[in-house]
Image (cartoon, helix red, strand yellow):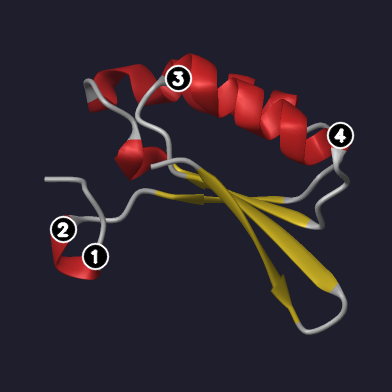
């Protein structure tokens, strides 16, 4: 899984992170910000490892988004996500 962009109508470009590796997520965020996407979705449920790391990781990810608005999701399996 990787990164994808989706154009909804003619006005909004959304970037969504679907990586299981933290360093790849940061690279994808940098890439999306450089491409001037309108909104970023950070799918935390795709990240491998313990949810105990999320309180430290989340502020760093949001800072990496710079001025780009971000939606943070952590979806459980029953909602179509990967979180148990």
Say whether residue 80 is left or right of residue 23. left
* First in sequence: mark 4 vs mark 2: 4
Q: Quadrant of the N terminus?
A: top left
Determine whether the residue tagged by mark 3 lies in a helix, strand or loop.
helix
Which residue is tagged 1? Answer: 80
* First in sequence: mark 4 vs mark 3: 3
Q: Callout 2: few (<14), some (14-19), or many (20+) C-alpha neighbours within 10 Å?
A: few
* First in sequence: mark 4 vs mark 1: 4
All told, the count of numbered labels is 4
Q: Disc 1 vs disc 3: Cβ atoms closer than 8 Å?
A: no
Question: Which residue is at a point 51% across and 15% down the rendered structure image?
Answer: 23
The image quadrant of residue 59 is top right
Which residue is tagged 3? Answer: 22
C-alpha span from label 4 to label 2: 32 Å
Judged by depth in the image, the label closer to the viewer, 4 or 1, is 4
Say whether residue 82 is left or right of residue 72. left
Rendering coords of residue 27 (x, y %): 63, 22
C-alpha span from label 2 to label 3: 20 Å
Which residue is tagged 4? Answer: 34
Question: Which residue is at a point 69% across and 60% down the rendered structure image?
Answer: 14
> Height in image: 36 above or below 47?
below
Say whether residue 79 is left or right of residue 43. left
Question: Which residue is at a point 34% across and 31% down the rendered structure image?
Answer: 47
Which residue is tagged 2? Answer: 77
Question: Which residue is at a point 86% across and 81% down the rendered structure image?
Answer: 10
Q: Disc 2 vs disc 3: Cβ atoms closer than 8 Å?
A: no
Rendering coords of residue 50 (x, y %): 22, 21
C-alpha span from label 2 to label 1: 5 Å
């Amino acid at each position: 899984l990787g990164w994808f962009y989706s154009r909804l109508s003619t006005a909004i470009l959304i970037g969504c992170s679907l990586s299981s590796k933290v360093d790849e997520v940061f690279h994808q965020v940098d890439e999306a910000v450089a491409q001037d996407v309108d909104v970023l979705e950070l799918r935390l449920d795709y990240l491998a490892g313990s949810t105990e790391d999320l309180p430290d990781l989340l502020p760093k990810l949001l800072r990496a988004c710079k001025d780009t608005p971000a939606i943070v999701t952590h979806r459980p399996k029953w909602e179509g996500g990967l979180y148990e």
